[in-house]
Amino acid sequence: MDIAYSVKRSPRRAKVTITIERDRRVVVYAPNHASDETVARIVDAKRHWIYEKTRHSQKYTGRTHPPGKEFVNGESALYLGRSYRIEIVNKGIESIQFDQRFLVPASRVHHKKGAMREWYIARAQERVLPRVAKRARELGVSFGKARIVDSRYRWGSCTVRDNINLNWRLIKAPIFVIDYVIAHELAHLLEPNHTPRFWNIVKAQVPAMDRARDWLREHGQLLEEEV
């Protein structure tokens, strides 16, 4: 069976690595000097591993984009792993407020797709980014920049320039899940591949690693809902 994959090259990358995205796409990251034949040979050598990963019964279930919820009084939205009630406010506020519930201006209700998005992104920048610096100090590594990004199929990534990118939707997840994703990406600064050493590094930083992975497998699709 032929394996379909895309190749992303960079002069800063030293070796070929393979990533399986959550939508089952196979992406190969390679240095500029690696020939197509070399990449193909490495992919072929990893054929069994790729086959197992793309058919994982939990992590890669069929994912149609969830329809989301109705943006009405009494509905709820996630924040740091908990659901909070939405209350539509007709006057008195111009932006979303949070006080153990979401107070949403009525003027925002018609913008369902973006109604909560800006608030979530702002909270992710405020709550998540400082944790990257904290975790990096604990791990003893240096990174370039940490950014909150909009990514449909990745919770996080570590770039060839040692930048850490984190999906803004993570702000909906519990802190231990956020810490797991951060530690996962920072661990790539020490070990680029998902080797036993890599997982040992992550688990040493986040003892709840297995619980966090299970949470994402079970609830990850909820983070992608519009509300």
Image: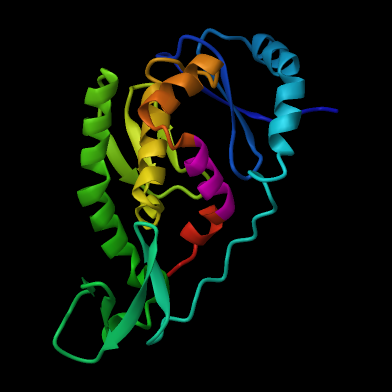
Up-down: is 120 above or below 124?
Answer: below
- Residue depicted at x 22% and y 32%: 134
The furthest residue to the front: 207
What secondary structure is the stretch in magenta mostly built from? Answer: helix
Quarter of the picture containing the C terminus is bottom left
Seen at 34% across and 79% down, the residue is 86
> Is residue 60 left or right of 99 when viewed as pictured?
right
Compared across the picture, whether 1 is left or right of 214 comes to: right
| Residue 21 included in the magenta stretch of the image | no
The foreground one among 182 and 175 is: 175
| x, y percent for residue 213 | 52, 41
Color encoding of the figure: rainbow
Numbered circles on residues, count: 0
The magenta segment: 210-218
Which quarter of the figure is the N terminus placed in?
A: top right
**To which quarter of the image does residue 203 belong?**
top left
Q: Position of residue 133 (x, y in %)?
A: 22, 32
Image height of 33 relative to 94, above or below: above
The residue positioned farthest toward the bottom in the image shown? 90
Q: Position of residue 99 (x, y in %)?
A: 21, 73
Residue at the spot x=39%, y=27% of the render?
A: 159
Can you name the residue that lies furthest to the right here?
1
Residue 4 sits in quarter: top right
Q: Is residue 4 visible?
A: no
Residue 163 vertical placement versus 213 (above, below)? above
Q: Quadrant of the rendered structure where residue 138 is?
A: top left
Depth check, front residue: 69 or 180:
180
Residue 196: x and y, percent?
55, 17
Is 53 on the left or on the right of 133, as rendered? right
Asked whether residue 217 is drawn in magenta, I would say yes
Residue 63 in sight here: yes
